[in-house]
Image (cartoon, rainbow, N blue to C red):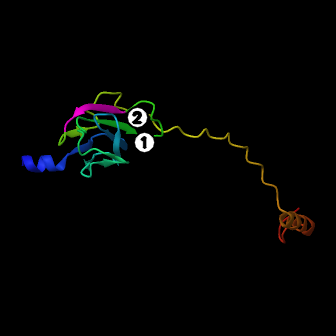
């Protein structure tokens, strides 16, 4: 069991909220190791088994403890949903368990244009001709004027 945990060298990410969130994983030196978009009530495993980020080799350098930062997916990254620090390899990290605001703002809706008044319907050219013909023809037979 210990061997599996050491070989995993990752983190289990649990989005235990009703929001779609992005989990960003950072190494002990602050470098970005990756991010995952996670749906509400979904669990995903993040694994950094390759040991390579960009052109930097981390095989000799410890990447732990990790920092996991949860962000809302509403276009605002001003403040994180929550933050976990000192995360060891093999840990389970929940979105609602970290430090932070732990809520997302609703996406901003585009302001609605004021509704234009509906123009009164005017009879089309054909309707005008038909109305004139009906008037000139007089009342239907059997009706009194």
Figure quadrant of residue 124: bottom right
Q: Are marks 2 and 1 in contact (CB under 8 Å)?
A: yes
| In the rendered image, the vertical position of residue 105 relative to residue 58, given as above or below | above
Foreground: disc 2 or disc 1:
1
Give the spatial CA distance, label 2 vs label 1: 8 Å
Dot 1 corresponds to which residue? 73
Residue extending farthest right: 136
Q: Which mark is residue 57?
A: none
Residue 67 % position (x, y): 29, 35
Q: Give the residue displayed 23% in from the left and 37% down from the top.
A: 64
- Vertical relation: 50 (above or below) 95: below
Can residue 64 be seen at all in this image of the molecule? yes
Viewer-nearest residue: 138 or 141? 138
Crowding at label 2, few (<14), some or many (≥20) Cα neighbours within 10 Å? some
Q: Earlier in the sequence, mark 2 or mark 1?
A: 1
The foreground one among 115 and 111 is: 111
| Image mark for residue 104 | 2
Q: Secondary structure at mark 2?
A: loop
Q: Is residue 36 visible?
A: no
Report the quarter where the C terminus lies: bottom right
User: Does 87 lie within the magenta span?
Assistant: yes
Does the stretch in magenta take in 19?
no
What residue range appears in magenta? 81-88
The spot of residue 143 in percent (x, y) is: 83, 66
Q: Is residue 87 left or right of residue 79?
A: left
For the point 7% across and 46% down, which residue is it?
2
């Amino acid at each position: 069991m210990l061997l599996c945990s050491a070989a995993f060298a990752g983190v289990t990410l649990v989005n235990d909220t009703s929001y779609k969130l992005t989990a960003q994983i950072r190494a002990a030196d602050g470098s970005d190791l990756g991010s995952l978009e996670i749906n509400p009530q979904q669990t995903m495993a993040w694994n950094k088994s390759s040991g390579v980020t960009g052109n930097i080799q981390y095989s000799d350098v410890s990447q732990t403890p990790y920092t996991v930062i949860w962000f809302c997916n509403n276009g605002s990254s001003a403040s994180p949903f929550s933050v976990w620090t000192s995360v060891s390899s093999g840990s389970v990290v929940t979105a609602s368990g970290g430090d932070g605001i732990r809520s997302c703002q609703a996406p901003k809706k585009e302001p609605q244009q004021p509704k234009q008044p509906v123009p009164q319907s005017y009879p089309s050219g054909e309707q005008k001709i038909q109305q004139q013909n009906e008037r000139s023809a007089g009342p239907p037979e059997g009706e009194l004027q």
